[in-house]
Image (tube, rainbow, N blue to C red):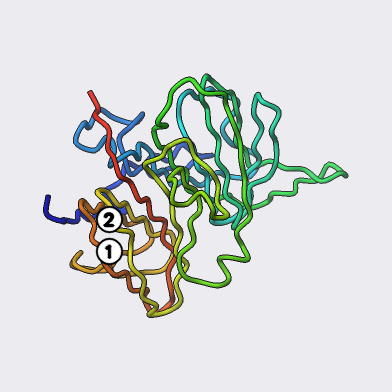
Amino acid sequence: MASHTVIRRSSDRNHANIGWLDSRNSFSFGVSDDLQNSHFGLLLVSNEDVIKPGTGFDTHPHRDMEIITWVLEGALVHQDSTGHNGIIYPGLAQRMSSGTGILHSERNDSWTLTGEPEHRNPVHFIQMWVIPDEAGVTPGYEQLDINDQLKQGGWTVLASGMPKHSNLRAIGIRQKHASLHIGRLRPAEVFQIPTAPFVHLFATRGTLELEGAGGVLSQGDAARVVSAEGQRVTAGPDGAEVLVWEMNATISMR
């Protein structure tokens, strides 16, 4: 199949603002019945959420999904039914494997020892879901601080289930056909995206140009590349941050 790219602008995403939550969703999974926009490759969910202080997602269930959370600003408090709890902050990636079933909450409501609110500002984050390659596994949790790697610039493998990344310092996911890269590029810096059947780029900060895409990608814009051939990405004048999914398989949605 010949390589081709589809640009999805930020303004084209499903948008819901319910007061405590301002959410923009790249795919229709769980939002609408748009079967033409249900997923790309193995990626089912790519949500950009902003949660106000003192609020958040109360305890709710998940099953058979690999869930990656990446915080852009603020801090997100996580608690789950397997006993994991902690605070996700910028530069610390989190993976939750829901497997046979897990309950968890995500809130913007940490407190100091004196009872004062610690999180006074909104938390802004990206959450991504991919289908695992095996259903019914034991739920799991992993987090990794990559701030030191990000300071070096360039591409970093953030999470992967691909055998070729087994020796890298990255979060493991239960999907052997997918990996998540993050690029934090300096102004005018140029890098290549992976060569893969399906590559999904999402701009989290700044602006960038993708070779052959025909335009600039700004914050919230995405590119879906079929039969990617290592196209070049060039950061704009203020630099850029981009999340890139490399996928060697896709799924069928009914």
Q: Residue at x 43, y 45 (%)?
A: 162
* Left or right, residue 243 beside residue 98: left
Mark 2: few/some/many CA within 10 Å (<14, 14-19, 20+): some
Residue 236 placed where, x, y %?
36, 75
Foreground of the two, 78 or 95: 95
Q: Which residue is drawn at 38% across and 38% down?
A: 45
Labelled disc at residue 223 = 2
* Left or right, residue 173 beside residue 248: right
Q: Residue at x 62, y 38 (%)?
A: 107
| Residue type, numbered disc 1 | Gly
Q: Can you say which quadrant of the picture contains the C terminus?
A: top left
Name above or below for residue 110 compared with residue 170: above
| Residue type, numbered disc 2 | Ala
Q: Earlier in the sequence, mark 2 or mark 1?
A: 2
Residue 160 placed where, x, y %?
47, 47
Labelled disc at residue 230 = 1
